[in-house]
Image (spheres, helix red, strand yellow):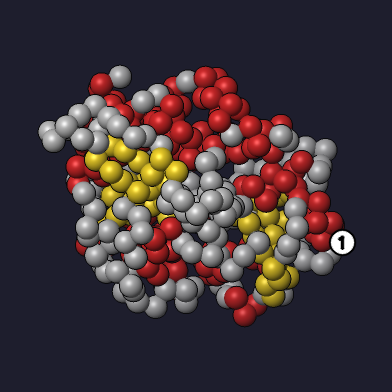
Amino acid sequence: MTMHITTRTRVAALALAGAAALTLASCGSEPQDGDALELIWAQPTPESMAYFPVIVAEENGYFEDEGVAVEVAPASEDLPTSSLVASGSADIAAASAGEIFFALASDPSLAVVYDATRLSPEGIVVPAGGDIVDVSGLDGATIGISSDEERALIASALDTAGLTLDDVTLVTVGGGGQVIANELDGGQFDAFAGSVLDFAAVQAVGYELQDITPESIAETPSGAFVIGEEADDAAVEGFLRAVARGTDWGLQNPDELEQLLRERVPEEWENEEVARSLFEFGLDGWSPREGADYGQLDAEVWQETVQRLTDAGELTEEVDLDALLDDRFIAPANDALGDE
């Protein structure tokens, strides 16, 4: 049985193996001083098709073209990537809006410079054909979660129906797709909040789901690139130019991209159905909003996110979006497409 689901979900944060940073590019077309500019990049997963533009940028030599030497910072699901930037362990990182807001408490100078993905990678699903068809039906429900990170998502989603976390019971679920499917089917919980990886794993065992994530939650920033005060502007610009080129190449050449990803991350293709869901989600998520440039920052979307998290009680500190959102790199990043 095929699972019919058009969910907007985050790729689960998996521990990045190894203690040492992995160099992606060691030299580049020479900037003014003749040396590549070093930059440490943090993403919430090991090398993955979820961040295909970074793979493409390395494979196609875009980092080298732009004169940057990129290292991937070790990360884990216990340490948000935004915290790595706040602590000075990374120069730039991909993080969700919520993680960035909370990291501002330790480093108020953080700046969001690129909004890479237009769709929130988190979602809430229920068994297809059941009594619950939207979040209003979650009153009194038991919701399975893959980690505490889903609390903010659930709180915001419930708030759209006039509900709060006090109206539901949250249960952390371990195990893979079969475990989640069994517990949904057996009634141990009524809904599940997790990632595209979780949902695809359920799909792989043939359990049909229905996405009930409110549309207003769908565009919550989840792949924003954040930098610290000490970041090298030239290195950041070169990195973003390479990523924009990698994104554009991937979206314009999906067949070639698929072949590249099968070679670079073969472990993600061991289950074809799961891989297909991840691949299609990546193409959809990295496509810019209609009429927008790659990475364009939408202040209205960010303001709505702040308001949702505040209304849901998940955000208690004021966020100065004028200070947080920094769009000075967007034009140079998109100008790089003219070099193709």
Task: Decide: is 50 above or below 198.
Answer: above
Quarter of the rendering occupied by the N terminus: top right
Please provide percent x and percent y for residue 165. Answer: 60, 75
The reply, left or right, for residue 112 in relation to residue 269 is left
Query: Looking at the picture, which amino acid does disc 1 mark?
Result: Gly
| Residue found at x 22% / y 58% | 230
Residue 151: image quadrant is bottom right
| Residue found at x 60% / y 27% | 262
| Residue found at x 43% / y 27% | 59
Residue 125: image quadrant is bottom right
Please provide percent x and percent y for residue 247. Answer: 41, 32
| Residue found at x 80% / y 56% | 179
The reply, left or right, for residue 50 in relation to residue 94 is right
The answer to whether residue 142 is visible is: yes
| Element on which disc 1 rests | loop
The answer to whether residue 298 is visible is: no
Residue identified by numbered label 1: 186
Q: Nearer the viewer, residue 259 or 244?
A: 259
